[in-house]
Amino acid sequence: MGEAPLRGLCAGAIHDCVRPRGGRVTDILGARTRVRGLPSSQALVTAAILVLFAILVIYPLLFLVAESLNVGDPQTFPPQDWGAGNYADLIDDWHVLANTAFVACCATVLAVAIGFLAAWTLTRTKLPGRAWLERLMELPYYMTPLVGALAWSILAAPRTGALNQLWHATGGPGDIVNIYSPLGIAWVMALFEGTVAFVMISAAMKSMDPSLEESARVLGAGKWRVMLTVTLPLVLPGVLGATVFVFAEMLGSFAAAFVLGIPARFVVITTAIWEAVQSFPPDYPRAAALGISLSGVMFATLGCYRLVIRRGSFATITGKAFRPRTMAMGRMAWVLFAGCLAYVVAAVFLPLAALLLTSFQRFATVILSESQFTLANYETALGFGAVRQALFNSLSLGAGVATIGVPLMVVLVWIVYRSKAPGHGLLEYVAMFPQAVPRTVFGLALLWAWLNIPVPIYGTLWLLALAYFTVLLPLGVRTLAGVVLQIDRSLEECARVCGASWGYQLRTVTVPLLRPGIVAAWLLVFIASVRELGVSIFLVGPNAKVIAPSIVSAWLSSSSELSAALALIQTASVFIALVVLFRATRRYSGELG
Amino acid sequence: MIEVSDLVVRYGDAIAVDRINFTVAPGEHVTLLGPSGCGKTTTLRSIAGLEEPSGGTIRIDGNTVYAATERRNIPAERRGVSMVFQSYAVWPHMSVADNVAYGLRVRKLPKAEIAEQVDRALGLVQMRAFASRSASLLSGGQQQRVALARAIAFSPSVLLFDEPLSNLDAKLRAEMRVELRELQRRLGVTSLYVTHDQEEALAISDRVSVMNVGRIEQVGTPQDIYNRPKTRFVADFVGSANLVEGKVRASNGPGPVTFDAAGGPSLQAWAAHPPRGDETHVAIRTAYIDFGAGANATNAKIRSRLFHGDFIQYIVDWPAGQLTIRRPPTEVLDEGAEVTLSFAAEHCVLLEG
């Protein structure tokens, strides 16, 4: 969808611009109706994208708002009785709200602590193997919280967890760790959000001009004084921004709370929404009220984030990358190095090892003498029709959404940053809006909206594709925006002056120059599609299975061995895409750099 | 031919171009000269169709490409103009030949003709040997030539230059200036050139249009602008001049006038316009003041001397304050020396404002 009409538009525009050389300009100017051709094609596309967005996002959310105000029969739509009763009932769910706040706060503090320490270590100290470690630090982002939560439940479940088993084997009494606890959930969430905090904070640290610190040193301030009076105030907005952003992500996160919270009967808002939908009969009004409230809080939090970034951006606004001055840390360097490495081990290598071991066993155990090795889990995963179908669906959805979605995102990003067409500013908000709606809530909204619309795409892959495109819009747009902004404007203007229409210019100049960004966006969208859980879990049906929800249901039917095998297959496909991504970006940066 | 009338460009409340009028005759090379922020680039981009003006009309070869009253704004690609950008805008993902062929391909010319025109254009800028080279491997000067070849390849009716030489080093810039001038003469293409470099403007233009805060201060041949500046801004911005404050004595019509410099001598000056009587300044070019007897001879004392290489700059005290004088490096006088200075009446120009 989207692409075909676009092609048509471009072709038309190319046709218009062609004229015989030396022909009088009057020939083309004769037709007065086409005189304002430039704004119109861009304005048309802008309008089309806005309409598409309204259908994809606003419409389902309006359905959800309507349902949250339904105080009559929960199964009828549109509601017969309207009222705020569902919101008033949220008071009874106070423990769910408190749980959410508690987990989100703990996880945020931990994630920002990890991110800050790692960012400071890797940007400001002399450390062996820094570049290499920086790459490793980004890995947790590509492990999904779902995979992480599964792995950590294998590692640290009470009694059966690997760590506890080892503890028992050495004769220790009781359990040393229990991952099925609020702090356990916060720990897993923090592990996978820590890398986001790391990337954001190190960006802030890298964009600080080292001469600001050097001038303080020259004026006679000592190391610590410089740190307190110059470095910290300049970096603080970046840290604060990361904190608020991570907090918003935590509010909407689902997988860890779902996998680890359900055995402990510990419910947060996102899992409460899922339970309300799964209960019989489904309590859609309660789920809707919870979802709308959560979106409201998340929206406000992200609003704070924008405010923090805008007001405190004196250190980061130049957008220029500096090479920060690094300090020799002596023996401390090794401690810091070990700290960073420990993080990567806890977030990536330990979970992968646990999954790998479990996936080859009949019954999960770390006591190798007791284990029975088998390939049965992989045979089931790849041989069982439903599972194979889910895997195939996920990969083809990922490829399809990326292939059709990324060209659309390119046009959208170009209009946002380059066009003067009316409404182009609005498009930026449009593109970023899905970021402010928790996946679970958006999944619920789509479920409810398409159940009540007589277009039979609920329970099909089409709806999943639309949903993926919408929720991954911010990711693709952010990736592409960075590259579009690097293209010198005059490269495109020159094409126009040479006689190229907008479409021809996009095709011959913009897209070739954007190629590294397009490849990166394609792969990131593919990866994110393959691992998507929050939306998928509401939209899968008997004929539309995808991998992440299948992992969850394998786990729910208490086969941690099968789910480990599935999780590894999913992770492997993501990592293959990742390797391609790194190789491709390296090649392109070599080509154009 | 370019005709611009009453052109206004506004950004919000700020006025970048404030009702300017000028024409570029067929085959003529006109330069818009002014400091940064004077609106010269905005004017050029409006003519190219890259900026949407707020008022006025722009006509190219007799066709109205922009008219505020008709709400007509022809998009850039259908104006038949060509442009050389400050950053060269040479596409790094194409070869040199592909860059140059772009405008021809857009016009769907037959392959053979494209090859012929590309070859001709590359020959004109002496870049034939680089045709198959990737554009990302070129030096600044070579990119400049490719940008030029690309701009002339499809024989545009009008050529626009946006500070094309400002990114080159001084020596290369001086060479390219000569080449640009020759190329423009040879092709006889109507050109509008934007620069903030007054030497460049004087050296290569048929006419120069000096702009300041969105308005045109003066239009004329390079000699005209240099010898007969109309305003304090032009006298100061183009070349180097002494501005002397005082009062003009009544006179009819343009020609010789007497100017009473404040606190000092009466000067034999020259007015290009009939003096109104309220003019307050004359301009004397630093290069037109001699040491020795002559018209407007006055006693002065050398305050300081700066050796610049190509000239020596003296600052002297004279009855009306201080004067800056530039003499050839052969005329060496000591600081503190008493001298007589003189300058011709026609080089003491009464300014309109």
Image: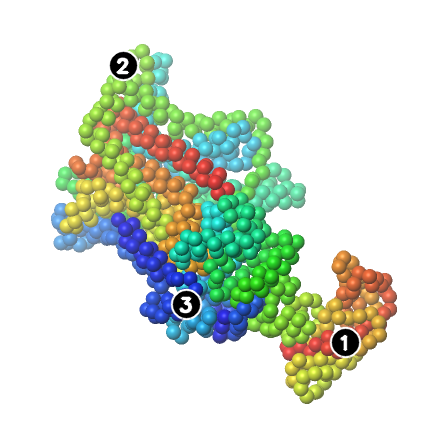
Question: Percent x, y for residue B210?
Answer: 59, 69
Residue A4 visible in image: yes
From the viewer's perspective, is residue B346 above or below residue A356? below
The residue indicated by pointer 3 is A25
**Amino acid type shown at disc 3:** Val
**Mark 3 or 2, nearer chain start:** 3
Question: Percent x, y for residue A129?
Answer: 52, 29
Name the one closer to the observer, B230 or A357: B230
> Circle 3 sits in a helix, a strand or a loop, which is it?
helix
Badge 1 and badge 2 in a common chain: no
Evaluate if marks 1 and 3 touch, with contact meaning CB atoms under 8 Å apart. no
Q: What's the mark number on residue B344?
A: 1
Question: Percent x, y for residue A312?
Answer: 48, 50
The residue indicated by pointer 2 is A372
Q: In the rendered structure, the residue with mark 3 lies on which chain?
A: A
Name the one closer to the observer, B314 or A556: B314
> Circle 1 sits in a helix, a strand or a loop, which is it?
loop
- Name the colour scheme: rainbow
User: At 32% across and 47% down in the image, what residue appears?
Assistant: A434
Quadrant in the picture for residue A29? bottom left
